[in-house]
Image (spheres, coloured by chain):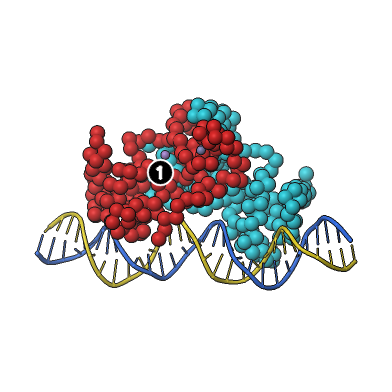
Chain colours: A cyan, B red, C yellow, D blue
Amino acid sequence: MPHTVRTEKEITRFAGFLQDQGLKLTTERTALVREIFATHYHFEADELLFKMKEKGLKISRATVYRTLELLVKSGMVRRVHLGEDHYHYEHVTGNSHHDHLICTTCGSVIEFHDDVLEQRQREICERKRFTPTFHNLQILGLCADCRKKGELPDAPDRVKMIGAGATQLRK
Amino acid sequence: MPHTVRTEKEITRFAGFLQDQGLKLTTERTALVREIFATHYHFEADELLFKMKEKGLKISRATVYRTLELLVKSGMVRRVHLGEDHYHYEHVTGNSHHDHLICTTCGSVIEFHDDVLEQRQREICERKRFTPTFHNLQILGLCADCRKKGELPDAPDRVKMIGAGATQLRK
DNA sequence: TCTGCAATTGAGACTCAGTCTCATTTGTTG
DNA sequence: CAACAAATGAGACTGAGTCTCAATTGCAGA
Ligand SMILES: [Mn+2]
Ligand SMILES: [Mn+2]
Ligand SMILES: [Zn+2]
Ligand SMILES: [Zn+2]
């Protein structure tokens, strides 16, 4: 399926969601969905704002945030923490829940999905009589490339910068 | 071990860390460590600031943040995400790594540690040739109490509303 | 196609957590 | 106890994100 066809499909999908909610498909919303599904993967709100500006489409910060919120509600976009102080977004194509390995040296992100891990989480919740709806796992560390280049795993102060909010895996 | 004795022990521990770094144990730092280890568990920076003010100890916002940073560096305090837009802190007593189940209805936090889960994470990293140093897992959902009260699990898009009624502590 | 009007937009004010600056104060070491 | 580096407080600043409101726009119905 060609790139643009898929993108147009996502616009239709969003249009349907908006219709259901009694909301309108505006040119701004269309342009944003097109941009998100055509070129971005993990991205920041302000980065998207800037991209639109670059393309000569003047869309306000407020509209960008408002549209992202709608996209999250529609399930077409997910808002995730990637170990930084602000959110990242990623489009959800079709299916796949996944979690993230994040290199604290080069910032690269590796996605993974593991059924065993997911199942174990469900078991833990059951044991605690907790009904899970959503989870968020980031593993921070050193990617293979950086390892090969002789980088050392996280100096403590580096961890402070990038691994904020993380808990220690191997003490 | 009585409460106050343990607290004083933590102050000594922090004093040692500061000494090693060529830093000073000030009255403000001492008071903050005492407060954190005596009464808080998961807490916010501004909440701590307010508590100190309540006690008649005037410690500036800057000092609170600076001291928390030092405590994180020393390993005595951990900075965590609990599904809200800002950080929470928790003191680390006895090096127990754990992750969190967070109720999106009442905000309660359940801690857990699971060796199987931790081991599986290491295996995933190995397969991706990724060297992990930290991780951060939050599972959001509905706690047993709220379930019993007939609350319904939040849709993922409601997750960002957690803490909507949180006390305003900033001056 | 035209119209009415609720939904949407943009500009910019605002919030809030967190950081930084710098003049003044304080703890430590000799 | 003096010297002086480290620390503090007040408040300015930052940056992500939210809100307000007058002007605009999409769209359902005539
Ligand atoms: Mn992803
Ligand atoms: Mn905890
Ligand atoms: Zn890397
Ligand atoms: Zn609950």
Q: Which residue is mark 1?
A: B42
Q: Eyeballing the image, is B108 above or below B67?
A: above
Residue at 74 percent of width and 52 percent of height: A22
- The image shows residue A154 at horizontal and vertical percentages of 42, 45
Pick whichever, B124 or C2, lies toward us.
Answer: C2
The 10 Å Cα crowd at callout 1, few under 14, some 14 to 19, many 20 or more, is some
Left/right placement of residue B146 relative to residue C10 reads left
The quadrant holding residue B152 is top right
- The image shows residue A14 at horizontal and vertical percentages of 73, 50
Residue at 70 percent of width and 53 percent of height: A33
Pick whichever, A126 or B150, lies toward us.
Answer: B150
Q: Eyeballing the image, is D11 above or below B107?
A: below
Left/right placement of residue A31 relative to residue B11 reads right
- The chain holding disc 1 is B
Q: Quadrant of the N terminus of chain A?
A: top right
Pick whichever, B161 or A147, lies toward us.
Answer: B161
Residue at 40 percent of width and 54 percent of height: B46
Q: Quadrant of the C terminus of chain A?
A: top left
Q: Is residue A147 visible?
A: no
- The image shows residue D25 at horizontal and vertical percentages of 76, 65
Q: Is residue B157 visible?
A: yes
- What kind of element bears circle 1? loop
Q: Eyeballing the image, is B94 above or below A92?
A: above
The quadrant holding residue B59 is bottom left
